[in-house]
Amino acid sequence: MKDQVDTFNARGVPSTSLNSHLTPKQMRERIEEIKEERYKVIYIAPEKLFSEDFVDVIKTLKIDHVAVDEAHCISQWGHDFRPKYKKIALALDSLPIRPVISAFTATANERVIDDISKLLKLKEPVIFKTTFDRPNLFIDVKLYEDKSDFVLKFIKKKVNALGIVYCNTRLDAERLAKKLLKDSYRVGLYHAGLTKKERNLVQEEFFADKYQVLVATNAFGMGLDKDNIRYIIHLNMPASLESYYQEIGRGGRDGLPCECILLFGLKDVMVNKALGKSRVYFKWRLREKQDWLEEMVRFAHSRDCYRQFVLNHFGEKIEPCGNCGNCLSNIVEVDQSVEGQKILSAIYHTKGYYGQGTIAIMLKGKLNQRIKDKRLNTLSVFGIMKEWTEGEINTLITNLLIDGYLEKVQDKMEERFVITEEGIKLIKGDIKYINKVKK
């Protein structure tokens, strides 16, 4: 919000904002200034719409236009639904004369667009849709064991470029920023745990190009308008494709290339599931978030065009782009029937009740406390893939899920693996498993 207000003011359009970061004194002063009609544009956070002073003021003003940014937040079907955004419709109803209303979003499918129109009570709205495609964004996914090591090596090659590294948690962001500072990089750190003064300072220095890299949680970026971001790395997997595409969409706004790299690990899935359960109260919403997460996992393990995968998700059909991590890789078809049989046999012997990580450790032949406690080291499948890394085994398990040889079902309070009919055929040797593999 701050950078948008600054941009308007720099262009000679008097603007201000009302949000929860203002002190009571600042809020009173700005409302007085609004009464005096000093501003052409007012940015307001949804939680401030029903403050008594503001309601009294807007009833006396002639408001010509209300624009709702990040409008997907209004819809319960949106990836970033925020209940406070529903107050916008109530605020519009309280105005003496209904103004022109527009809504903007970069990540809404048809269902979300319909929901936004209904909730804002738009009458026969004119809908403008442009392509979701951003050809200058180079999309790639790395299945990396040591993510911090990758970031350090990557940034070393990009010392003259500005980038953002997104982390799922404050702790991850703080740890990575500390490592980068130790290597003498100019690093900014941004998350919701900082004070308002600290966040404002980081934002100002970021826009002034004081940093080589900004390490942030998703608290940073909504309304961001900076055109020279050359790379965006996700240290952890976002919770949905919409969130992911919105965040990488902040790069390359000058039309020049921007590298967008997702670093994926099995732990990301577990962390996202835990975060989802801690924040969601309705079963239908939790199920939907799990569906989004599964779609992200399919994306991360896709062996076809990444751009095609994302745009198909948003309802756009394109040919393979020829310029993403997969399109530019040497992907070959490999007969992995034997390895597939080993994984399915391990799941059969454990009745599907162990998680993906435990199955991978067992097949690798690593002896940890859980393996000992459950006596999994006594099974005939223990260590039968010892020449593979845990990461490679996990990737193959996920591929078997995506390709329909396995599925996950809800059993009471937990998910468990079930071998499908195709999987049974593979175990028996009736069919082969031909997998696409990056060389």
Image: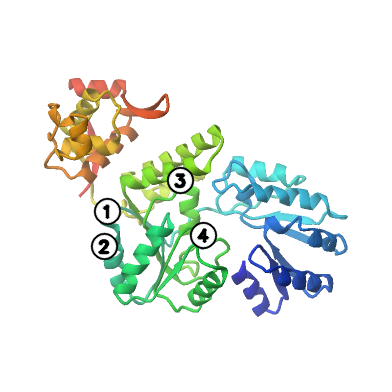
Mark identifier at residue 219: 4
Confirm or deny contact between disc 1 and disc 2 (CB under 8 A): yes
**Closer to us: 347 or 23:** 23
Q: Nearer the viewer, mark 1 or mark 4?
A: 4
Distance from label 1 to label 3 (Cα)? 22 Å
- Under mark 3, the amino acid is Leu
Instruction: Name the residue carrying label 1.
Output: 144
In the figure, 113 relative to 152: above or below?
A: above
Marked residue nearer the N-terminal end (1 or 3) = 1
Amino acid at circle 2: Asp
Q: Residues within 10 Å of mark 1 (few under 14, many from 20)?
A: some
In terms of sequence position, does the residue under pointer 1 or pointer 4 come before the other? Answer: 1
Q: Rounded to the nearest whole Å, what is the CA distance between mark 2 and mark 4?
A: 24 Å
Of the residues shown, which amino acid type is indicated by label 4?
Answer: Ala
Element at badge 1? Answer: loop
Q: Residue 76 appears at what percent x and percent y? A: 61, 42
Residue 43, quarter of the rendered image: bottom right
Mark 1–mark 3 CB contact (< 8 Å): no
